[in-house]
Amino acid sequence: MAASFSNLSALFYVTFFVSCFVHLSVNVEASNGGGGFTVDLIHRDSPLSPFYNPSNTHFDRLRNAFHRSTLRAAHFKPTSTSTPQDSIQSRMIASAGEYLMNLSIGTPPVTILGIADTGSSLIWTQCEPCINCYKQKAPIYNSTRSSTYKAFSCDSKACQALEEPPSCTGVCEYTVFYGDGSSTFGDLAAETFTFGSTSGHPVSIPKVVFGCGRDNGGIFNESTSGIIGLGGAQLSLVNQLSENIHGKFSYCLVPPFNATSSGVTSKINFGTNATVSGSGVVSTPLVSKTAESFYYLTLEGITVGNKTLPYKSSSFKSKAGVNEGNIIIDSGTTLTFLHQDFYKGLESALVAAIGGAKRVPDPQGTFKLCYATKGHDFKVPTVTFHFTGAVLDLLAWSTFTKVQDDLTCLTIIPTDNIAIFGNLSQVNFLVGYDLVNKKVSFKPTDCTKV
Ligand SMILES: *[C@@H]1O[C@H](CO)[C@@H](O)[C@H](O)[C@H]1NC(C)=O
Ligand SMILES: *[C@@H]1O[C@H](CO)[C@@H](O)[C@H](O)[C@H]1NC(C)=O
Ligand SMILES: *[C@@H]1O[C@H](CO)[C@@H](O)[C@H](O)[C@H]1NC(C)=O
Ligand SMILES: *[C@@H]1O[C@H](CO)[C@@H](O)[C@H](O)[C@H]1NC(C)=O
Ligand SMILES: *[C@@H]1O[C@H](CO)[C@@H](O)[C@H](O)[C@H]1NC(C)=O
Ligand SMILES: *[C@@H]1O[C@H](CO)[C@@H](O)[C@H](O)[C@H]1NC(C)=O
Ligand SMILES: *[C@@H]1O[C@H](CO)[C@@H](O)[C@H](O)[C@H]1NC(C)=O
């Protein structure tokens, strides 16, 4: 895969793909009018999800999510110690995806429930006839029963757009390995995808390139049928629909307590519905790197109260000042991870700003800065992230979250890998990705109301 190429050849590789595969995009049918649509994201812990476990308390769910988040972050690993900020070895853990997208494929249509993932790009679903499919509750899509299924040959552009080299036996066969050892193998094919939109009118899109997964294994759950890749590489859903949705998608994540208590769903928007505009919008450039699936931003510094700390570390390679693309924005990682050299200074600044409140260790060891909250509150200073061109005041409750009845902890933790801007920090912001103009925008929003 791209991350294992040397920097120079990887640069050519990226340029080549961008110039040769733009016309892979397909047309949204005319019935959709404006070229924009919005679908519900079903959170795995919401009562709408097949994963819902009513006996878990809110704090159980939070702890479980933190655990899954740490597992996932451990897999955003650099390929070698010489380029700690530049390359990434493996993708998300297949089971860690938390948002599910409900759509149907084929003619006649078959419903699939895929994990929406901004950390990988290929869309795939289990596909009969299977060599080896994991147990799935819903019926598995059968490619021989669909009149719109068409497999790609090896010399097709779609086949050459795969991030990992295909194997070829006449038809184009893809393989994806995930960080936890899960994998999928099958035929690269085109099919009609139908999205149920929040407007009630289904949106049908023909000739979407996807993986017809005939040999799938690992820790996939029987409630899901595959993955919907929303990453930055050519075959991701977003890039395939780019002509119609203009390379735009956005999401608005509701606070975890709202998602689990009232079943309010987060939304994902595509195309014109994904435009982030109006007052309070700030934007920062997307930085291209060799691991095309990930979305990189540049973090210049963080302000705590009135003290600004430049985001740098002795281990960063850059000669002067800021290291471009030094942080990944991810929808599937809960916590925010910052380089440990920098983290120490951040923690000291927070401790100083908070003053006399009683600091206690996290009994489970995940969090580094916690305060006892039983009976007394402490005042959380404003924490401001300075991305290039975008100044973002984080919400106090998402920066310091109650992780159990008597304990409130900082949801930013140190790492010696690439930094990640996690989803808790993104809650109640409308977050818009624009792959054509290469930027990410943020707008403070009550996501329970959109
Ligand atoms: C799949 O999810 C269900 C519901 O949360 C859970 O009970 C089950 O153990 C999961 N299966 C696997 C293989 O993880
Ligand atoms: C963030 O991601 C984690 C892990 O994938 C998930 O469990 C959690 O619910 C997500 N949180 C939000 C607020 O979307
Ligand atoms: C997915 O959509 C189909 C068709 O609209 C519906 O029957 C099914 O219940 C939905 N599944 C979930 C988990 O929402
Ligand atoms: C798939 O569909 C074909 C054609 O209808 C049928 O012969 C075959 O048995 C189906 N396979 C499975 C596993 O359902
Ligand atoms: C676009 O978003 C609006 C609300 O923001 C919604 O009412 C409308 O149904 C969405 N359009 C589609 C096609 O989903
Ligand atoms: C979200 O949760 C907060 C805090 O519990 C509550 O005040 C608010 O009413 C909830 N909003 C919705 C739409 O459920
Ligand atoms: C920063 O804030 C603290 C506490 O509000 C204040 O004592 C200090 O003078 C401020 N420093 C600067 C440089 O404004």
Image: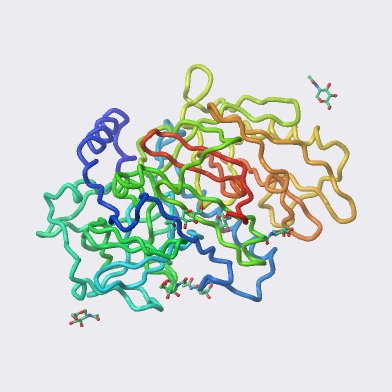
Q: Which residue appears at 54% of the width and 71% of the height?
A: 48
Q: Is residue 196 visible?
A: yes
In the figure, 85 relative to 368: above or below? Answer: above
For the rendered model, the colour scheme is rainbow
Q: Which residue appears at 41% of the width and 50% of the height?
A: 270
Percent x, y for residue 19? Answer: 22, 35
Along the line of sight, the residue nearer the viewer: 6 or 296: 296
Along the line of sight, the residue nearer the viewer: 217 or 110: 110
Along the line of sight, the residue nearer the viewer: 90 or 236: 236
Percent x, y for residue 276? Answer: 50, 41
The N terminus appears in which quarter of the rendering?
Answer: top left
Percent x, y for residue 423? Answer: 57, 49
In the figure, 255 relative to 17: above or below? Answer: below
Left or right: 398 in relation to 323: right
- The outermost residue toward the top is 320
- The outermost residue toward the left is 170
Q: Is residue 90 visible?
A: no
Quarter holding residue 150 = bottom left
Quarter holding residue 256 = bottom right
In the figure, 146 relative to 394: above or below? Answer: below
Along the line of sight, the residue nearer the viewer: 100 or 126: 100
The C terminus appears in which quarter of the rendering?
Answer: bottom right
Quarter holding residue 351 = top right
